Amino acid sequence: MLKNALIYRIEHWDQPSLAEIADRLSGSPFVECGLTQPESAGWVAPRGDKHDALAEIVGGQLVVKLCAERRAVPGSAVKQQLQAQLDAIEQQTGRRPKGKQLKELKEAVVHALMPRAFPKRTDTLVWIDLQARMVWVGAGSTKRADVVVTRLIECLGGGLKLALLQTELSPATAMSLWLSEKEAPSGFSIDRECELKQPDSEKATVRYARHTLDIDEVGEHIRQGKLPTQLALTWASRVSFVLTEALTLKKIQLLDVVLEGAGVDAANAGKDDDGFDADVAIATGELRQMLPALIEALGGLHERQAAAAPEALPDAGAEDAAPWETAAA
């Protein structure tokens, strides 16, 4: 369901009904880029093109999906065309365009080449855990996640306020401690992938892949000042992922014990539409249990977020949470 994720806390949200959310999302559907349009973004059905619903509730978990398309003109093509035009103008007028005129010429070249640029499309799944007041954005970078979050706030209404999850210990500090002491946090095991980077202008980097990390060499790198920027972990022998210095989870994978216990074929998990509900239920069920353990391993919620933590929203599966279910009924 999610290969990568950044996690945000819901600091405020006057929760609308599912019907209201679907209506708001339908006001900003995905539309393909026009021939001269550099980018476009909008909401699509999480279940796939054969379905119309832009918001899905599975086991009390809200799932939506943002689709973005971008036409990127290769810089080399722009440079070549621009150079030809500059040479022609210089030959005709005896001077080479600069400043504002150069900028306008470049924009005109990009605009002219745009229809020939091949559009690239990306989908980003968003999971909103109503009871835990967490929003999981299926992106591997804050830049991409920020675009999705901005769209969410614009479309979902209800005064939605989100803040990137913060913990008392920074991931880099915690990972340094675990590796130096050769001891994983409670409930986790350290896997065979790690990246350490020197926090200076040279950014000297050491990477371990498919290599045991229970060695003195790793601790020596840390003592010399390198900080872990990525570390592979497994929680409860059920979920593996790579934790980054930005508290991004990458390479999220449900392990065989989870899929076998749920009667899911690991090779085909998530590939058929009929399995959408099962995939979402299994993935969200595991990840929402794993996250509190990870937060605890990182020293708990940051003091500011812990102090500002509001009461949980009603569980969408509970009777008093009926606005989701009754609106869809």
Image (cartoon, grey):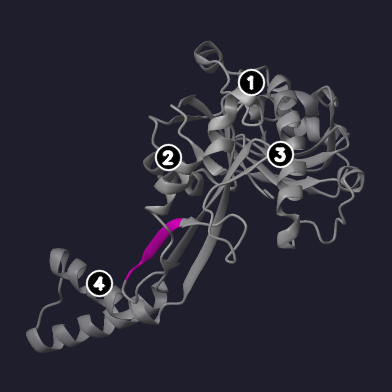
- Residue at 47% x, 60% y: name it: 68
**Left-right relation of 33 to 295:** left
- Amino acid type at circle 3 is Thr
Q: Which residue is mark 3?
A: 284
Quadrant of res 158: top left
In the image, what residue type sits under mark 1?
A: Leu
Of the numbered discs in the image, which one, if any, rests on residue 156?
Answer: 2
Task: Let me know if residue 255 appears in the view.
Answer: yes
Q: What SS does tag 2 mark?
A: helix
- Mark 4 lies on a secondary structure that is helix
Residue 280's disc number: none
In three-dimensional space, the C-alpha distance between marks 3 and 4, rounded to whole angstroms, equals: 47 Å
Q: In front: mark 2 or mark 4? A: 2
Left or right of residue 234, residue 42 in this image: left
Measure the alpha-carbon separation of dots 2 and 4: 38 Å
From the image, tell me which residue sits under label 1. 169
